Amino acid sequence: MQYRSFGKVGWKVSALGFGCMRLPTHDGKAFSGKIRERESIRMIRYAIDRGVNYLDTAYGYHEGRSEALVREALRGEYRDEVRIATKSPVWLVEKPKDFDTYLNRQLRRLGTKHVDFYLFHGLNKESWKNKVLKHNLIKRAEAARKDGRIGHLGFSFHDNYGTFKEIVDGHDGWDFCQIQYNYMDVLNQAGTKGLKYAARKGLAVIVMEPLLGGRLANPPEQIRNIIKQRSNRRTPADLALQWVWSQPEVSLILSGMSTMGQVRENVRSASASDIGTMGARELKLVDRLRSEYLSKTPISCTKCGYCMPCPNGVDIPENFELYNEGFIHDDVGTARMIYARFTSKNRRASACKQCRKCEKRCPQALPISQLMIRVHSVLGGGKTYSAD
């Protein structure tokens, strides 16, 4: 296993961390609470035995059962081999003391009085303003750090670069952050710019979704053929992971693994990883793959944001991005799941009233109102369309 510096914390973390969000389940459904406990524990211990020293879980993972599973996996000598990260469910916080209520519940689930790394979960502009700042949750977190319940404080993130920078600059006590990052997300969310900014500020940067929910590991046939022609030694998954590990600002990659095969493959990749391992030829290949993916984009939205704000609350760029990704990766099913589970109703395409105010501001002259009907028909209604 390779190890990397964890920001200013002064600790070496394994290049690969085990994300406990996609554990195997009895019903075969991702994120289900019906965890196959024996197999999950076997997978986690296999990774630890091979040098993985960071486990990531959260209050809501696997319908609230992931933290208890981690406790079982770490019984005996395994607890001393790793550090645990879990996350505060900020969306459930309605008053300041709720922070402590959930933290204490999580400690009981984990069977410990101290969690090594604690994150505000999935921050965006709204939750930063209306949860963390409104309820002064940083003060609560710092008090928990002082009394020993928390070791290091950070946040995971899903929004744009401007909001990311605001949050990074919003507290001098951050030790680390967690961002979605892969070779298709260099301009999305925090992006490469956010990765470098946080690292310059001394934060350890944890990368989640390095395989974009598994889609980069199982690419469309045309992408797979390009990889076969240009790279004899790498699988699609290894190519995507090594691209992230090659960057010096990355402290570790989190992978949510569902099978022992995935654990073995990722451990092998991590053991062969290092900063700058990808040469010019492979970097050029990744650029080619990105271009091929983007060439499949059905709606030419550049996410400039000129169409926003929508008077009806629709997040126009977010809906277009989700729709596009369904076709880019030949995986409309996942896009539908995200639309249903993680896109609030007031921000969905279905909230569009066809007022057409946005269309007057769109530099691409997109017929946004009509496209919103199509987006919701595909993502919300289950209809099938071609990308054209």
Image: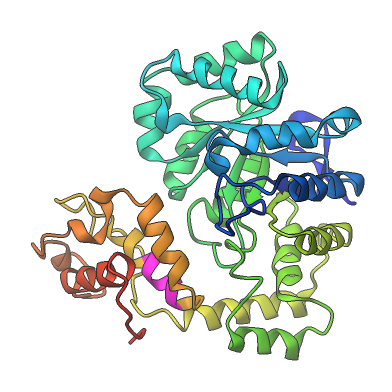
Quarter occupied by residue 258 = bottom right
Q: Furthest residue to the top?
A: 147
Dividing the image into 4 quarters, which one contains the C terminus? Answer: bottom left
Q: Is residue 375 above or below residue 112?
A: below
In the rendered view, how is the structure colored? Answer: rainbow
Q: Is 297 one of the magenta-colored residues?
A: no
Is 137 left or right of 203, judged from the image as shown? left
Q: How many marks?
A: 0
User: Which residue shows up at 41% across the image and 33% down it?
Assistant: 91
| Dominant secondary structure of the residues highlighted in magenta in the image | helix
Quarter occupied by residue 366 = bottom left
Where residue 193 appears, as percent x and y from the top left, is: 56, 53
User: Which residue shows up at 79% across the image and 64% down it?
Assistant: 261
Q: Is residue 332 above or below residue 28?
A: below
Where residue 303 appears, as percent x and y from the top left, is: 36, 63
User: Which residue shows up at 66% across the image and 43% down it?
Assistant: 205
Region rendered in magenta: 321-327
